[in-house]
Image (tube, rainbow, N blue to C red):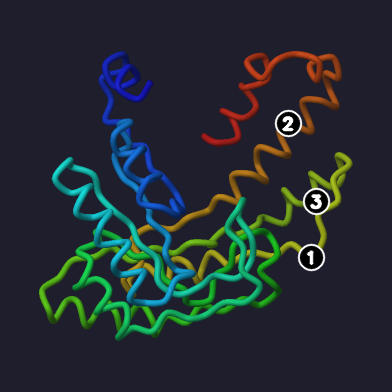
Amino acid sequence: LIEAAVIETDLPICVHLDHGDTFELCKSCIDGGFTSVMIDGSSLPLEQNIELTREVVKYAHPRGVSVEGELGVLGGQEDHVFAENSTYTNPLDAVRFIQATGVDALAISYGTMHGANKGKGAKLRREIPIAIKECINRLGIFCALVSHGSSTVPQYIVKEINDLGGDIQNAYGIPIDQLTAAIPCGIRKINVDTDIRLAVTRNMKELFKNQPALQKLSLIHISEPTRLALIS
């Protein structure tokens, strides 16, 4: 499907595996045409995380696929990824991890959280990416730092969902000014999965309210609101 889309559209299409948890899953995605994969060994001890990530890098790089790792633990939940509490990334461990694995990108824990309930007044510890950035720059190593769990959770969308029958409570995100301030600190990729889900949920609820009969149709008939949510 990926190769067909590239041929048909003549566009540079990227497909990324998020939170892959085994070498076999990453290998399968690489063999299937994914252009980048994430191997999430953050729940493992440091040495095991390094070894797992290094094996994925060894398989991916000769095939032209970039690899993202993760060090530190984000609290909250995203699909099958769950942690009750956060554990900040140790900058010295991060530098060692980058050197030992050769990853192209590294997701760090510096105050963000998965899900829509990040708590009021969330504050990012920018000193963590700053320290990592300065160390790898001195060593002449490139690695893009990644900010997972960074959705802003727009309150107007939360209200619209609840007005349409939803029940989202205590939903607060990361302030945009904190995210923009993190970019000069070394953050090169910002993940906002929850914001996308909220926008799609709002549009789908609105569609079903205005056209109840569509709930009986297949997804192909109701894909337009999803597309609009992703591009608006």
Tell me the residue that label 1 is attached to: 170
Q: Quadrant of the N terminus?
A: top left
Q: Secondary structure at mark 2?
A: helix
Look at label 1 and name its amino acid: Asn
x%, y% of residue 180? 44, 66
2 or 3: tag closer to the N-terminus: 3
How many numbered discs, if any?
3
Q: Is residue 116 above or below residue 7?
A: below
How far is the residue under mark 3 from the one under mark 1? Answer: 11 Å
**In contact (CB < 8 Å): disc 2 and disc 3:** no
Look at label 2 and name its amino acid: Met
Q: Is residue 168 above or below residue 51?
A: above
Question: Which of label 2 and label 3 is nearer to you?
Answer: 2
Q: Secondary structure at mark 3?
A: helix
Q: Quadrant of residue 12?
A: top left
Q: Quadrant of the C terminus?
A: top right
| Classed neighbour count for the residue bearing mark 1: other residues with Cα under 10 Å, few (<14), some (14–19), many (≥20) | few
Tell me the residue that label 3 is attached to: 159
x%, y% of residue 146? 38, 63
174 or 38, which lies in front?
38
3 or 1: tag closer to the N-terminus: 3
Residue at 31% across / 45% down in the picture? Answer: 36
Residue at 81% across / 15% down in the picture? Answer: 216
Q: Secondary structure at mark 1?
A: loop
Q: Is residue 211 above or below residue 121?
A: above
How far is the residue under mark 2 from the one under mark 1? Answer: 22 Å
Which numbered tag is attached to residue 204? 2
